[in-house]
Structures are given as structure tokens and as C-alpha cells.
Image (tube, grey):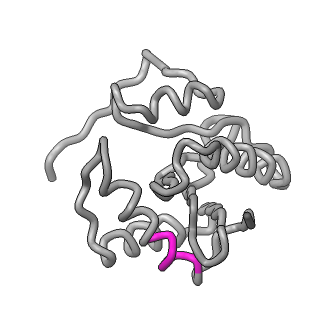
Amino acid sequence: MDFCIMQQEDIERCAHTLIKAFGEEPWNEKWTFEQAYTRIDEIMSARVSRGYVIYDGDTVVSMLCGRIMTYLNFKELWVDEFSVHPDYQRQGIGTKMMEFVRAKLKEEKEKISYIVLNTEKGYPSVKFYQANGFEIDESLVFMAADV
């Protein structure tokens, strides 16, 4: 498997993986290619964007992308999208991606203190993230409002 920094030319394959990963249980989301491609392209469009890809041949088996954000006197990687191709799930690929991302963040010239993200309560992703060193912050509330 090849571990890479995401490039513009990877986005198309990453979009296909996002569609497959989130089209299955427990999410059952119906992404079109255009929606998936646009989301990843938007996330990757800023100078603070970071993206990572694991390939098995021509297949993107995992992708993670987000943004380096400043908060007070430290920086965090805010993960906006992370997926593992369904054919590769439960094989340790997600953990290997997290290890790769952490190693790459340690190479950044400015210290990145945290990786942060949102995920759905009660989904298997919560246990995955906890097994990879993430903690639930009970002091935070996710909020949304209609425009």
C-alpha cells in the first residue's frame, strides 16, 4: 500500500471511495459523484488544507482531509472527511491512516497540538476513534441552524 499526501489528481478517486464508504451501513448516505468531488475539492482548496490518501494499486482505500486551524496559542487539524473503502474496513487501515497523519503532522514546521473531529453518536466510528486515542469532550455541544 502507498501512503500519500493528497493531490488535486487524487480527488476523483477519493470521491468514489467516499461514495462507497458512506453509502453503506450505518450511514446509508446517497452521495452523487459531483457532490462528493465538490466536498473534497472545497475542503482541499485553502492554504491550511491537508489531505492524506492510502492507495492499493489504483484504488483509494482510505482518505482523510481537513484544515489546520489556530485556536489561541495552538493549532489543530480539524478533520472534515475520513473514510475507508468498504472492501478494506476492519483490517486496520483506519488506524494506519491515523498513524500516517500523526507522523505527517509532526513534520509540519508549526507544531500541531490536536486532531479534532465530529462524528455521529452511537455509530461504530465512536469506538474506532476512542481506540485511536480520541476522547469525547462532554463540555461541547454541536449546534446547527437553518439559514
Give the x, y percent position of residue 37: 40, 74
Q: Quadrant of residue 98?
A: top right
Pick the front one: 114 or 29: 29
Identified at 36% across, 32% down, the residue is 123
Look at the image and say whether residue 64 sits in the magenta stretch: no
Identified at 48% across, 64% down, the residue is 43
Give the x, y percent position of residue 136: 49, 21
Give the x, y percent position of residue 97: 66, 50
* Residue at the outermost bottom position: 9
Identified at 64% across, 43% down, the residue is 92
User: For the magenta stretch, what is the residue range?
Assistant: 10-15
- Magenta span: predominant SS is helix
Pick the front one: 45 or 12: 12
Is 76 placed left or right of 139 in the picture? right
Give the x, y percent position of residue 138: 43, 16
Above or below, 6 relative to 124: below
Count of all numbered marks drawn on residues in the image: 0
Identified at 62% across, 63% down, the residue is 51
Q: Quadrant of the N terminus?
A: bottom right
Look at the image and say whether residue 12 sits in the magenta stretch: yes
Is 139 placed left or right of 73 in the picture? left
Above or below, 12 relative to 105: below
* Residue at the outermost top position: 138
Is 42 placed left or right of 135 in the picture? left
